[in-house]
Amino acid sequence: MSKIKRLGCALVLIGITAVMVRSQNKADEYVTPAEAVPTGKAPKMQVQLLNPGEATKQYAVIFYQGDEAYSGLQEFAEKYHVTSAHFTAIGALNGAIVGWFDPQRKMYKKIPINGQHEVIGMSGDIALYQGRPVVHTHMVVGGPDGTTHGGHLLEAYVSPTLEVMVTVDPVAMRKRLDPETNLTLIDPALK
Amino acid sequence: MRWKQIEDEPKTFALIFETGDEIATVLQQFAAGQGLAGSSFKAIGALSYARLGWFNWETKKYDPACVLNEQVELLSLIGDIALRDGAPQVHAHVVVGRSDGTAHGGHLLEARVRPTCELILTESPVHLQKKYDPESGIALIQV
């Protein structure tokens, strides 16, 4: 009898530990949309203006081995005072985190991408929120067997290069906070 | 493949591929013929055959990621053109969708069009140059 009791106690303990570990993992597995983008993680990034003198500017933003692309794009947007832009990119990376927006939690579920992958398609835009540029990027990556994964860009470690072609438009686009989703959404009517 | 210049500033082309055209070869020929550099493009369409690569960091070569000998949607083709040793070099990545909706993707090695592929290409006045990168073993854009 006491053996069964002890076994029962042990099972309960294991259960509690499992729940605790799981809820701890849950906290690490999600990220809020408002989380600040760390800068200074793309020291090799290079920028070239491709059409000097034009109102609509075209830039090549090129990343190299080890650069973190999301923080680099944020730095580019701030340094070049970008108020409205869109871009596409291709390249390759070694390690990334993409997000999937969970409408129930109003948070991004983190999806880790491990190892060397082709950046098959990256597209995004830049608009202002509270006067600061916000970079919004999605990407699809391909692994060694051609299978693809994708999502909202949270982190991407470039290897060996990422070529981003940016068009910066002269008219600013602004975002407003959408209370329903906790996301900042572009509102073309905002002046 | 038929093409038309649809804008002067910036110089923009529409390239329309037809059944049987191989995108990588035709695009490379077009780039050389027009003397393109510092260009970027995107396309959608459908393919009867695709061979896609994955960059192997150990061997510094593109491994064949997948070979699809079947009708697939060309969901996304994004790429750029830069000069390497004075000649234009096309770099493109592809996502294709199979009949069950699953997606495959990689570096464009070979893609045979069926029935069409619509590609829009924009050239910038400033040319982009590629230089051999000893760490990766391939030529990367230097700005």
Image: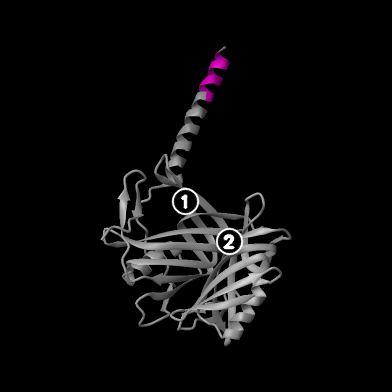
**Magenta span of residues:** A2-11
Residue in the foreground of this view, choosing between B16 and B85: B16
Give yes or no for contact between labels 1 and 2 (Cβ–Cβ under 8 Å): no
Q: How is the image coloured?
A: one colour
Q: Residue at x 74, y 60 (%)?
A: B69
Identify the residue position indicated by label 1 in the image.
A99
Task: Considering the whole magenta stretch, tell me its main secondary structure.
Answer: helix
- Asked whether residue B61 appears in the rendered view, the answer is no
Question: Which of the image's four quarters has the N terminus of chain B?
Answer: bottom right
Q: Is residue A159 magenta?
A: no
Q: How many marks?
A: 2
Earlier-in-chain disc, 1 versus 2: 1
Tag 2: amino acid:
His
Q: Quadrant of residue A168?
A: bottom left
- Asked whether residue A147 appears in the rendered view, the answer is yes
Badge 1 element: strand
Q: Residue furthest right?
A: B69
Identify the residue position indicated by label 2 in the image.
A117
Please tell me whether residue A178 is drawn above or below residue B77 in the rendered image: above
Q: Residue furthest top?
A: A1
Q: Position of residue A70 (x, y in %)?
A: 43, 62
Q: Position of residue A189 (x, y in %)?
A: 29, 57
Q: Residue at x 59, y 81 (%)?
A: B31
Q: Is residue B128 left or right of residue A49?
A: right
Q: Position of residue B79 (x, y in %)?
A: 55, 71
**Mark 1, chain letter?**
A
Q: Position of residue A93 (x, y in %)?
A: 54, 63
Give neighbour class at mark 2: few <14, some 14-19, many 20+ (Cα, 10 Å): many
Q: Nearer the viewer, mark 1 or mark 2?
A: 1
Q: Is residue B66 left or right of residue A126?
A: right
Q: Residue at x 60, y 72 (%)?
A: B16
